[in-house]
């Protein structure tokens, strides 16, 4: 039985840098993007000193938003590979997790089937958020350098950018709530902040991963 005083390492420095870098740039891109979206949101543009500056900030942030994950991928390709391997190994226990998740969400004690490093919900979040962000980046660069692309691509980029913005924003906010404020899973915040989590939490929420870490393989 795991001890509540013991901690296990969950995320490396580069994974945490990629995560928080993505969070900060995403929020600035969301606010500056909404300022560009509609003149009725000009109070948001005022945060950046007006509409034109909001566009400049949006483009600069977009560069960091692209470079940070790519730099972290280059620094730690093994970590990224492990993440993707786990995320795409969606099986019976992940479906089981999704079935009991509503109980856990509303504070009832639920028997969670043993999960790997990422549970069924986190796997879905990783796939949807990453895919939306890749499409946000592709459509964003097409809008930015519109003179270099055919007109139909530029025209498609606007609705694609907006739909992915809505999708990614829903996922990011849901993920932020579950990963920090939700009483059952709040410990996961410390995994991404300090790099470690309590052993008893790891055993309860990610039994397969915990056993693997403890077994040293
Ligand atoms: C590499 C990433 C990104 C790039 C290169 C990029 C680029 C751009 C550009 C150039 C525009 C202005 C289009 C114009 O001149 O009218 C724009 C608009 C916008 N961006 Fe981004 N962006 C990126 C990521 C994001 C993210 C992560 C969000 C929000 C989560 C976002 C939300 C928006 C919104 C709401 C608009 C207004 C769209 C519209 O007018 O229909 N962008 N983006």
Image (cartoon, rainbow, N blue to C red):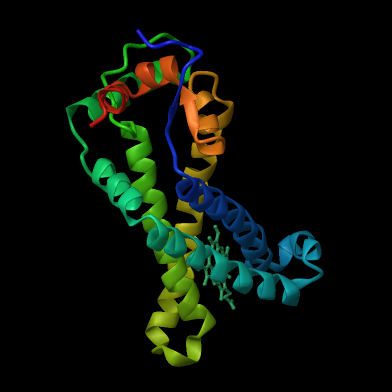
Please tell me which residue is depicted at 73% across the width and 63% down the height of the picture: 40
* Residue at position x 39%, y 42% in the image: 125
Horizontal placement of 41 versus 135: left or right? Answer: right
Placement of the N terminus among the 4 image quadrants: top left
Relative placement, left or right, of 165 versus 58 is: left
176 versus 55 height, above or below: above
**Residue reaching furthest bottom?**
147
Q: Quadrant of residue 61?
A: bottom right
**Quarter occupied by residue 87:** top left
- Where residue 135 appears, as percent x and y from the top left, is 40, 65
Q: Tell me how many marks there are.
A: 0
Task: Name which residue lies at 42% across and 34% down.
Answer: 10
Q: Quadrant of the C terminus?
A: top left
Query: Where residue 159 appears, x then y in whole percent?
Result: 46, 68
Viewer-closest of 196 and 108? 196
Where is residue 84? Give x, y as percent.
29, 48
Q: Kindly give the residue lying farthest to the front in the view shown.
A: 216
Instruction: Kindly identify the residue that appears in the image at 64 percent across and 61 percent down.
Output: 34
Ligand 1 is found in the corner quadrant, namely bottom right
Q: Return the x and y of residue 190 as percentages of the image width and height.
A: 54, 30
The answer to whether 95 is drawn above or below residue 26 in the figure is above
Q: Quadrant of residue 124?
A: top left
């Amino acid at each position: 039985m795991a001890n509540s005083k013991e901690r296990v390492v969950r995320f490396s420095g580069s994974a945490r840098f990629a995560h928080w870098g993505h969070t900060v740039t995403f929020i600035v891109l969301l606010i500056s993007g909404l300022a560009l979206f509609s003149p009725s949101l000009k109070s948001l543009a005022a945060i950046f000193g007006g509409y034109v500056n909001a566009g400049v900030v949006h483009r600069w942030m977009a560069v960091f938003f692209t470079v940070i994950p790519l730099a972290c991928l280059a620094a730690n390709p093994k970590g990224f590979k492990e993440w993707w391997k786990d995320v795409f190994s969606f099986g019976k226990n992940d479906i089981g997790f999704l079935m009991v998740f509503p109980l856990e969400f509303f504070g009832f004690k639920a028997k969670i089937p043993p999960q790997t490093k990422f549970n069924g919900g986190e796997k879905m979040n990783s796939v949807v958020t990453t895919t939306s962000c890749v499409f946000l980046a592709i459509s964003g660069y097409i809008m930015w350098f519109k003179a270099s692309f055919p007109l139909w691509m530029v025209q498609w980029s606007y609705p694609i950018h907006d739909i992915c913005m809505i999708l990614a924003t829903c996922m990011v906010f849901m993920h932020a709530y579950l990963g920090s404020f939700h009483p059952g899973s709040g410990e996961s915040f410390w995994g991404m902040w300090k790099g470690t989590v309590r052993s008893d939490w790891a055993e309860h929420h990610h039994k397969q991963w915990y056993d693997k870490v403890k077994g040293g393989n």
